[in-house]
Amino acid sequence: MIWDFDYSSVSAIAKLLEENGLSMTKKFGQNFLVSQQVLDRIVSQCGGLEGKTVWEIGPGIGALTTKLLKAGAAVTSFEIDHGFCRILREKAYIEESRFRLVEGDALKNWKDLYNKEGTPDVICANLPYNVGSIFIASLIEGRCVPQRMVYTLQSEVVQRMCAKVGGEDYSGFTVLTNIDYENREAFRIKAGCFFPPPNVDSSVVVMQERPEKLVPEELVPRLVSLVRVLFSQRRKTVKNNLKGLGLKNEELGKLLATAGVPSGERAEKLSMDQLIALTKEFEYATHCSHSKETFE
C-alpha cells in the first residue's frame, strides 16, 4: 500500500520530520524535491516502467519512489539514513509488494544485490551531490550497466558527463560515462523546486545504453586504467603521464604512433576512438611482454 502524503508541501515535510525526531543532514547531501511537475518529468525520462525493475538511491521520504511505483515499476530503494528508512518501512509503503528497502550505504552494498540478481532495467535517483559521480563511476567500473540511468545531479557534474573532446569540462569522468552510454542533459531544475534549496545548480541527465558497444568488454578494465593515468595530471602530455607504466621511452613512442596519438598531446584532446586505439595497443604490448600487472 502506498501512503497518501503531500510531497509538494514544505510544511507537511517539516511536520513529518519533527514528529519523527529527524532533521536533514549535510553529511548525506539531503534536499527534497517538492515540485510534482519536475518529479513527473524525471520519471518520464525513464521510458515505460510497467513491470520494470528500478533501483533508486537516496529516496529520502519517498517523493520519487511513489512516482516510480505508480508508473508500474518494482522499486528497490537504497537509503543510508535510518530515520528515513523507518518512515519508508513503517509509514510510506506498508506491505507494498513492489517496494523493497535496502538499508545502508549504497556505495558499499549495491554489489551484493547485483551479484545476487544482476543488473536492474533502470536506475533513477536524486543522487546526493556529495557522492553522485563516485556512485556512477562505481557502477560502470563494476560493470553494472542498466539500459538506462536517470539522475538528478549537480549541473557541473552533468556538464562533465556531456562534454565534448577538447572542452574545458572534458575529463576522465566524461570518458568513463561514455564507454557504455550516450549522455544528454534532459533539463535543469531551479533551486526553489527543492526543500531546502541547494546552493548549486541542478540538472537531470539521461544515460542511454549505446546500441553497439564502443569497446570490447574484455578491454574495459584496461581503458579505465589508462584513462585514470592519462587524466591524473591534466597539464602533462600524454607521453609524460604514461611514462610510469613501465615501457621504455622508445617503446612508448612507437606505441603512441601506432595508435595515432601525438605524444605531445594532452588527454583532454583525445577522442574516444584514439583512447580505444591506445587501449588496444597497450593490451597487445602487455600480452607480448607477459607483464600485464605492470599496467593495472
Image: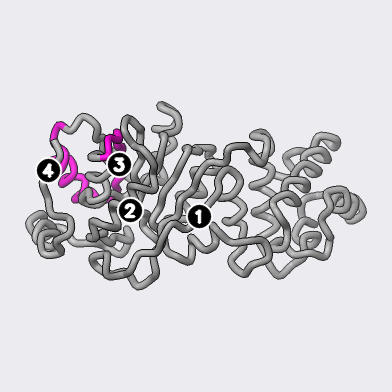
Total label count? 4
Identify the residue at image location x=74%, y=64%: 266
Earlier-in-chain disc, 3 versus 4: 4
* Mark-to-mark CA distance, 3 and 4: 16 Å
Identify the residue at image location x=35%, y=49%: 125
Vertical order, 149 against 132 (above or below): above
In reply to whether residue 194 is colored magenta, the answer given is no
Tags 1 and 4 in contact by the CB under 8 Å rule?
no
Q: What stretch is highlighted in magenta?
A: 71-95
Give the amino acid type for the residue marked by disc 2 in the picture.
Arg
Quarter of the image with the C terminus is: top right
Q: Residue furthest right?
A: 250
Q: What element carries label 3?
A: strand
Q: What element carries label 4?
A: loop
Question: Which residue was labeled with disc 4?
Answer: 3
Question: Which residue was labeled with disc 3?
Answer: 77
Q: In which quarter of the image is residue 187?
A: bottom left
Q: Quadrant of residue 111?
A: top left
Left or right: 38, with 89 as reference point:
right
Earlier-in-chain disc, 1 versus 2: 2
* Mark-to-mark CA distance, 3 and 1: 24 Å
Evaluate whether residue 248 shows in this view.
Answer: no
Earlier-in-chain disc, 4 versus 2: 4
Left or right: 92, with 28 as reference point:
left
Q: What element carries label 2?
A: helix
Question: Which residue was labeled with disc 2?
Answer: 41
Residue 184 is tagged as 1
Earlier-in-chain disc, 3 versus 2: 2
* Mark-to-mark CA distance, 1 and 4: 33 Å
